[in-house]
Image: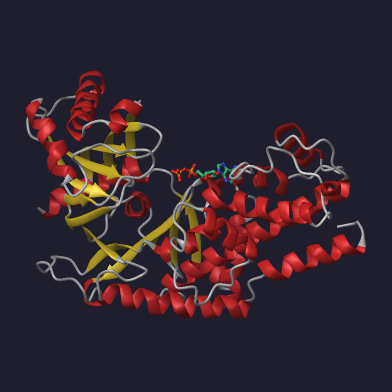
Amino acid sequence: VDGSSAQKEAINGIAKEFEVSTENLRTIVKQFNEDMDKGLQRHGATVAMIPSYVQGRPTGKETGKYLALDLGGTNLRVCEVNLLGDSKVTIHQQKFVVSNELKTGEMRHLCDYIADCVDSFLTENGSDKLDNDLQLGFTFSFPVNQTAINRGTLMQWTKGFSCSGAVGKDVVIMLQDSFRRKNLNVHIAAIVNDTVGTLMANGYRDPKSHMGVILGTGTNAAYYETMDKIVKWDQAPTSTKEMAVNMEWGAFDNERRVIHLTTYDNKLDRESINPRLQTYEKLISGMYLGEITRNVLVSLIDRSLLFNGLSSPDLNKQWAFETAYMSTIESDATKDLSDTQHVLESILGLPMTTLVDRQMVKKVCEFVGVRAARVSAAGLAAVLSHSNLVEEGCTIAIDGSVFEFYPNFADNMMAGLKELFGEQIENKVKFALARDGSGLGAAVIAMMAHRAA
Ligand code: ADP
């Protein structure tokens, strides 16, 4: 950064605040490992370590037709997945709009609508409506208290849904009921968490897959655990040695023990709808990175070190600085940082910016983005060491726009792993972009549930 000595000093100070040293990483990993153990021992721990009831691993040799249903993203999605063996698949999918009226009405109406969508999908795409039941994997991206592979009560709605008559009820039973009333020969074989779906989708293609990670709007991860380590398991003995565990790792460090939080993080947290919760997620995921950056920029403005001390109405708005802007700014390789200028002046309405302003903004994005990737690496490292895979290596399947689009995110995560485990880790651990957890992944889980039943 060019600029005055006060500006340089401020940027250096911010760099220090966002720094996560190798030593810090080690401390975070150690705490992560302790929290994983706690979560495996008892119910209700900070890192919840929820058994998914998905037993064993796919081999990629499985064949057959399965349905997948995805509720909780932007659209309702219905897929027919044809497992061809040999790690190959074909997928037909159709998207359906869920109106606000349905999202906030009665649960029975929503279930009937979903049943209609599945029915119309099968009529249009239905290769052959089989005589026997079609098995369906249901990705339901809301907090669920699962009691079997296809049993789970809704704990609360999120993301703009608020249907009456659903909280505390088993969502699989309600939807299955709608299928039955409409004479649909579809059996809901599994309720699927997106992390476990990501793990299984990649597992079908790559037997070395050990972890499924989401780095999108939020963050979470799942991995294969051996049953003897799931001490709190109090259900019937399983037929396999392993089960996928949904870590719910976004809650890591809610007790504020190990990760240094800046004033910018604390402001974001205080103003969020869930203060003191999802601490780890707030440092990593797409929903928050832009807002942390905005907090830094506004504080630099308040100190008259940026934009000549002047903000814009847009930049003053909470959540106005999107994480996608950070990707644009960080990948800006123009000499005068004109892409950055576009974001600041055309999108955010700042009257004018100097090159030094733009250089400073780019630096701030880099600090926030690099920290996010390094802190993410700590979670990956915790699972690698917990599962004893540092020597042997494995594939980590990752879904989400932050991983897919944020510049250098993968490299910065790998750099963190190298500091912790040595250079050779790069030849052992592979990151794989896996965007089909709720399609292929859910279908694979339906297949595995049906096979185990
Ligand atoms: P979801 O996690 O909701 O299934 P995504 O994986 O697409 O969906 O993640 C959406 C999140 O990613 C949003 O919070 C958004 O801010 C962020 N995002 C979208 N585009 C980009 C981008 N180009 N670079 C970084 N983050 C992005």
Percent position (x, y) of residue 154? Answer: 23, 49
Which residue is located at x 21 percent, y 74 percent? Answer: 232
Identity of the residue drawn at 90% across and 57% down: 2
Front-most of residues 38 and 334: 38
Q: Position of residue 205 (x, y in %)?
A: 37, 50
In the picture, measured across the screen, residue 253 lies left or right of residue 198, that is right
Which of 299 and 177 lies nearest the eye of the viewer?
299
Instruction: Give the total of numbered labels.
Output: 0
Say which quarter of the image contains residue 162: top left
- When the figure is inspected, residue 290 is found, relative to residue 258, above or below; the finding is above
452 in relation to 99, above or below: below
Is any atom of residue 423 visible in this view?
no
Q: Does residue 424 appear left or right of residue 180 in this picture?
A: right
What is the quadrant of residue 50 in the picture? bottom left
Extreme residue toward the right, this view? 4
Q: Residue at x 20, y 19 (%)?
A: 123
Q: Residue furthest top?
A: 124
The vertical placement of 170 against 68, above or below, is below
Color style of the picture: secondary structure
Could you tell me residue 329's position as x and y percent?
72, 45
Query: Who's the residue at 63% across and 66% down the image?
Result: 262
Q: 312 above or below 98?
A: below
Quadrant in which the N terminus is drawn: bottom right
Q: Quadrant of residue 264?
A: bottom right
Task: Say whether residue 23 is visible.
Answer: yes
Question: Looking at the image, which is closer to me, 299 or 359?
Answer: 299
Q: Position of residue 294 (x, y in %)?
A: 67, 50
